C-alpha cells in the first residue's frame, strides 16, 4: 500500500515546481566547495545559535510572570526546550530532520512572540499614528463610510499623547487621514466585523509578521531553514510590527512575489512560481507604497531572463505588469469609484505632502545639529537619483546583482528625508528569499556600448556621483541661522518649559518658520509656539528674538546629564530644515539642605 505522505509530497512538489538551477537543496549555498561533513557541522552550529536564542528568550520571559499564568509556565518550558534542542542538534542523525527544525522554529516563534503578546495585551494606546489611523479607518469602513472622505479625528483618542506621535508637515499641520492604498485598512476590517476592538491593528500586524516568518521557513531550502529561525529571533522585526509598524501586512505578499521570481512565465515546469508573482505583488502594492519600488526591478529582471531563454520578452513582461495593476485596482477600485480625488490624494500623500524630516538615514546629520540644516527637496531628489542608480546598476551587472538587488533597494531610502527603520529593515526578509531561491544568472553582460564606452556602467557611475553631489548640496545654505540664548528649565532639571532663540533670516524673502525641539525622543514632540500662538515672521536679512513653548499639556523631558538637544525650524518655501548646533544640557544637581 503506497504511503499517503509520499503521495502528498509528490503532489506538492509538482505544484511548487523544481528547484531553480544553482540552488539545489540549499547545502551548496551553505557550504560551497566544502565537504559534506563540514556542511553538516556548519548546519549544526547554525541551529545551536537558534537554540541559544530560544534559551535567552525563555530567561528574559521569566520576569513577565505577572502578566498571565501561561507565561509563568512558558518561560521554564522554553528553557527546557532549548536544552533538549542542544542535545537533538548534536546527537541526532541530522539537524535537517523535520521534527528538529519544527521544534526550533516553534521555539523561536514562542520566544519572540510571547513578550509582544504581553505588550499588546496590556497596552491601551497605539504606539504610532499610522496604527491609530488604520484602526479608525477600518472601523469607519465597517460602519459603511468611505475612510478617504470620512473624518478620522477619533484617532487622537487611541494615542496617549497625540502630539508625540503625529506625522507632521513642514507647514505646521499633521497627517489626519488615510495616506496609503485601500488595502492598508481593508486587512483589519474582518477583525472588526468579528467583534474585536482592542489594539486590532497591532494584533493583525503581529499575525502578519508571524505568517511572514513561517513562509520564510517553508520557502527557503530545507538545509537553510535555520536562517528563518535566526531572523525571527533577532526580535527587532517582532518589536516593530507588534508595536505600531503597519508594514507587516504587505510582507507575506511581497515575500511570495520575490520567491523564485525568475521562474515567472516559464510554463507548468516552473510550478506555482510561474504565475504567482504578479498576483502577490499586486496585493502588496495595494497595501503600502513601499512595494511599488520593487516592480521596476522585477520587470527588468524578468525581461532579461526571458530574453536569455530565447523567448520574446515583451509579452511576458506586459502580462506581468497587467496582472499586477489589475490586482492593485481590484482592491482599490471601490474607493476610486466612491471618490477618485480623495483616494488619489490619500494614496500619493507621502510623495506629494512636504513632511518633516525623520529617520535613521543621511538626514540624521541635520536632525542632530551637525550641519545646520538640510534642503528637503534636494535630499528627496538625491534619493530618487540613488534609486535610478541602483536600477541601472541592476541592468549593467545583472549577473552579479540578480540575487543581490533586494539588499540595494533600501539604499535610496537612506538618502530620503524620511528614512525610518522600517524602510531600511523591511526589505531584509524579502532579500533573503531572493538570495536563496532565485537561480544563478546565466553568463553574459547586459551592458550597452556606444563605441568603446559601456553606456549602462557609465550611467550607473554618473548617477552615483549625482547622488553624492545632490546630497552634499542639500546640507549647504540653510535659510535660517538659529542661535540658542536660554532655556527655562523646571525643578530637578527634568523638564524644559521654554526656549529663547535668536533667529536670523539669511535669504532675500520673508520666512515664517515652524519650530520643533529634539530632546532625543523617538519622534518629534509636536510644534512649539509663541506664548499667544502668534506666527513668527522673519524679514529678509534680519534677526528676531523668539521664545517658544511646547504643545499644551505636553511635558518635554530633557535628555540625560551631559547630553545634547537641538531646536529645529521648518520653512515651507523653500522646503528646508534649519537647526541650532547641539545644545549641551549641563545638569547641575540641587544643593542638599544644610544639616540642623
Image (cartoon, rainbow, N blue to C red):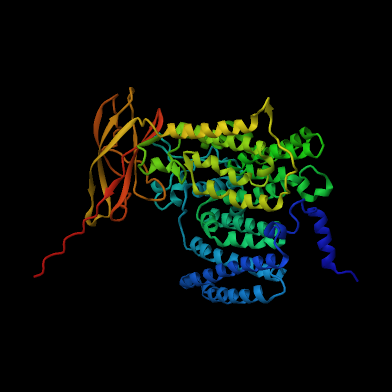
Looking at the rendered image, the quarter that the C terminus falls into is bottom left
Q: Compared with residue 106, is residue 479 higher up or lower down, i.e. above or below?
A: above
Q: In the rendered image, is residue 188 in sight?
A: no
Residue drawn at x 61%, y 74% is: 86
x, y percent for residue 304 = 73, 37
Residue at the front extreme, as displayed: 452
Q: Residue at x 52, y 37 (%)?
A: 350
Residue 68 left/right relative to 249: left
Residue at image point 53% right, 63% down: 117
Q: Is 463 above or below relative to 198?
A: above
Q: Position of residue 194 (x, y in %)?
A: 61, 56
Measured from the top left, where is residue 296 in percent x and y? 65, 37
Q: Left of 270 or right of it: where is 129?
A: left
Residue extending furthest right?
Answer: 1
Q: Nearer the viewer, residue 169 or 470?
A: 470
Residue 33, x across and y down, in percent: 71, 58
Amino acid at each position: 500500500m503506497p504511503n499517503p505522505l509520499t503521495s502528498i509530497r509528490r503532489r506538492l512538489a509538482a505544484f511548487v515546481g523544481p528547484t531553480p538551477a544553482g540552488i539545489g537543496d540549499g547545502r551548496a549555498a551553505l557550504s560551497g566547495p566544502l565537504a559534506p561533513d563540514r556542511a553538516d557541522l556548519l548546519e549544526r552550529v547554525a541551529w545551536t545559535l537558534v537554540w541559544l536564542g530560544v534559551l535567552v528568550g525563555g530567561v528574559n520571559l521569566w520576569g513577565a510572570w505577572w502578566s498571565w499564568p501561561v507565561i509563568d509556565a512558558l518561560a521554564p518550558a522554553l528553557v527546557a526546550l532549548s536544552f533538549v534542542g542542544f542535545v537533538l542538534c548534536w546527537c541526532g542523525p541530522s539537524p535537517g530532520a523535520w521534527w528538529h527544525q519544527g521544534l526550533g522554529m516553534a521555539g523561536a516563534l514562542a520566544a519572540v512572540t510571547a513578550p509582544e503578546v504581553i505588550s499588546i495585551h496590556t497596552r491601551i494606546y497605539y504606539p504610532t499614528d499610522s496604527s491609530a489611523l488604520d484602526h479608525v479607518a477600518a472601523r469607519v469602513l465597517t460602519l459603511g463610510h468611505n475612510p478617504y472622505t470620512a473624518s478620522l479625528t477619533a484617532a487622537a483618542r487611541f494615542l496617549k499623547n497625540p502630539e508625540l506621535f503625529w506625522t507632521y508637515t513642514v507647514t505646521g499641520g499633521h497627517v489626519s487621514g488615510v495616506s496609503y492604498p485601500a488595502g492598508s485598512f481593508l486587512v483589519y476590517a474582518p477583525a472588526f466585523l468579528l467583534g474585536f476592538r482592542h489594539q486590532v491593528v497591532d494584533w493583525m500586524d503581529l499575525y502578519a509578521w508571524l505568517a511572514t516568518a513561517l513562509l520564510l521557513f517553508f520557502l527557503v531550502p530545507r538545509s537553510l531553514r535555520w536562517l528563518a529561525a535566526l531572523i525571527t529571533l533577532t526580535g527587532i522585526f517582532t518589536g516593530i510590527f507588534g508595536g505600531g509598524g503597519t508594514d507587516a501586512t504587505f510582507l507575506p505578499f511581497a515575500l511570495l512575489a520575490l520567491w523564485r521570481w525568475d521562474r515567472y512565465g516559464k510554463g507548468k515546469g516552473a510550478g506555482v512560481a510561474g504565475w504567482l508573482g504578479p498576483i502577490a505583488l499586486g496585493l502588496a502594492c495595494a497595501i503600502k507604497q513601499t512595494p511599488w519600488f520593487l516592480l521596476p526591478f522585477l520587470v527588468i529582471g524578468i525581461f532579461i531572463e526571458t530574453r536569455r531563454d530565447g523567448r520574446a520578452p515583451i509579452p511576458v513582461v506586459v502580462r506581468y505588469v497587467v496582472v499586477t495593476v489589475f490586482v492593485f485596482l481590484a482592491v482599490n477600485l471601490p474607493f476610486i469609484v466612491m471618490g477618485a480625488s480623495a483616494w488619489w490624494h490619500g494614496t500619493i500623500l507621502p510623495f506629494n505632502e512636504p513632511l518633516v524630516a525623520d529617520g535613521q538615514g543621511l538626514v540624521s546629520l541635520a536632525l542632530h545639529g551637525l550641519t545646520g540644516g538640510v534642503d528637503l527637496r534636494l535630499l528627496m531628489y538625491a534619493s530618487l537619483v540613488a534609486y535610478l542608480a541602483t536600477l541601472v546598476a541592476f541592468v549593467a551587472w545583472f549577473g552579479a546583482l540578480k540575487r543581490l538587488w533586494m539588499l540595494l533597494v533600501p539604499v535610496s531610502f537612506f538618502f530620503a528625508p524620511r528614512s525610518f527603520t522600517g524602510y531600511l529593515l523591511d526589505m531584509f526578509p524579502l532579500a533573503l528569499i531572493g538570495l536563496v531561491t532565485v537561480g544563478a544568472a546565466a553568463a553574459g553582460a547586459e551592458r550597452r556600448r556606444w563605441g568603446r564606452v559601456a553606456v549602462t556602467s557609465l550611467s550607473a557611475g554618473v548617477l552615483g556621483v549625482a547622488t553624492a553631489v545632490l546630497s552634499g548640496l542639500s546640507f549647504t545654505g540653510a535659510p535660517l541661522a538659529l542661535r540658542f540664548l536660554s532655556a527655562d528649565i523646571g525643578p530637578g532639571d527634568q523638564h524644559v518649559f521654554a526656549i529663547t532663540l535668536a533667529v536670523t533670516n539669511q535669504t532675500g524673502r520673508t520666512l515664517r518658520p515652524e519650530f520643533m525641539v529634539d530632546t532625543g525622543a523617538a519622534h518629534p514632540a509636536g510644534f512649539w509656539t509663541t506664548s499667544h500662538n502668534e506666527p513668527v515672521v522673519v524679514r529678509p536679512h534680519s534677526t528676531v528674538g523668539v521664545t517658544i513653548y511646547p504643545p499644551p499639556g505636553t511635558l518635554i523631558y530633557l535628555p540625560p546629564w551631559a547630553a545634547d538637544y537641538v531646536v529645529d525650524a521648518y520653512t515651507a518655501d523653500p522646503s528646508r530644515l534649519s537647526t541650532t548646533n547641539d545644545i549641551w544640557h549641563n545638569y547641575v544637581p540641587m544643593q542638599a539642605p544644610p544639616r540642623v
